[in-house]
Image (spheres, helix red, strand yellow):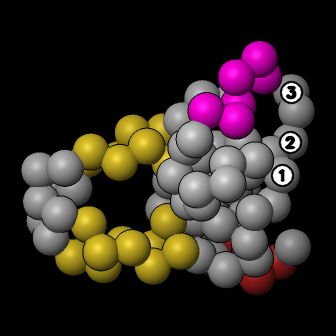
Amino acid sequence: MSKPEIAAKTPFAIDVEKGKDYYWCSCGKSKSQPFCDGSHKGSEFNPVKYSAEDSKTVYFCGCKNSANGALCDGTHKSL
């Protein structure tokens, strides 16, 4: 299994809207971080869907190594 590229060693704070879907980049190659722009095509990576249940600030993982999927779990602190 390939490892994703580290896009950032900090999370991306994004204001999400209730009821809207967001597609988090899992490969780290997207130029539209933290969201997918299709750069993963031809690889084993796929975008991860995040559905906002509330309008709020969400911290999307920038290091692409979170055990919490699209959301930051602090893993970047140990990289």
Residue 39 % position (x, y): 70, 35
Q: Secondary structure at mark 3?
A: loop
Which of the 4 image quarters holds residue 47? top right
Rendered residue at 61%/33% (across/down): 38
| Disc 2 to disc 1: CB gap under 8 Å | yes
Quadrant containing the N terminus is top right
Tell me the residue at 39%/73% (across/down).
14
Magenta span dominant secondary structure: loop
Does the rendering let one see residue 68?
no
The reply to whether the C-beta atoms of the residues labelled 2 and 3 are less than 8 Å apart is yes
Q: Which residue is mark 2?
A: 3
State the CA–CA distance, disc 1 to disc 3: 13 Å
Magenta residue check for 24: no
Task: Work out which quarter of the rendered image holds the C terminus and state it.
Answer: bottom right
- Does 77 appear above or below 54? below
Q: Is residue 42 magenta?
A: yes
Q: Position of residue 77 (x, y in %)?
A: 76, 82
Residue 37's x, y, as percent?
A: 57, 41
The local crowd at label 2, few if under 14, some if 14 to 19, many if 20 or more residues have their Cα within 10 Å, is: few
Tell me the residue that label 3 is attached to. Answer: 1
36 on left or right of 5 = left
What residue type is disc 3 on? Met
Sort mark 1 into few (<14), some (14-19) or many (20+) by Cα contacts within 10 Å.
Answer: some
Number of numbered discs overlaid on the protein picture: 3
Question: Which residue occupies 11% across, 50% down?
Answer: 19
* Label 2 SS: loop
Q: CA distance from mark 2 to mark 1?
A: 7 Å
Estimate the x, y position of residue 18 in percent, counting from the top left.
12, 60
Q: Which residue is mark 1?
A: 5
Range shown magenta: 38-44
Residue type at mark 2 is Lys
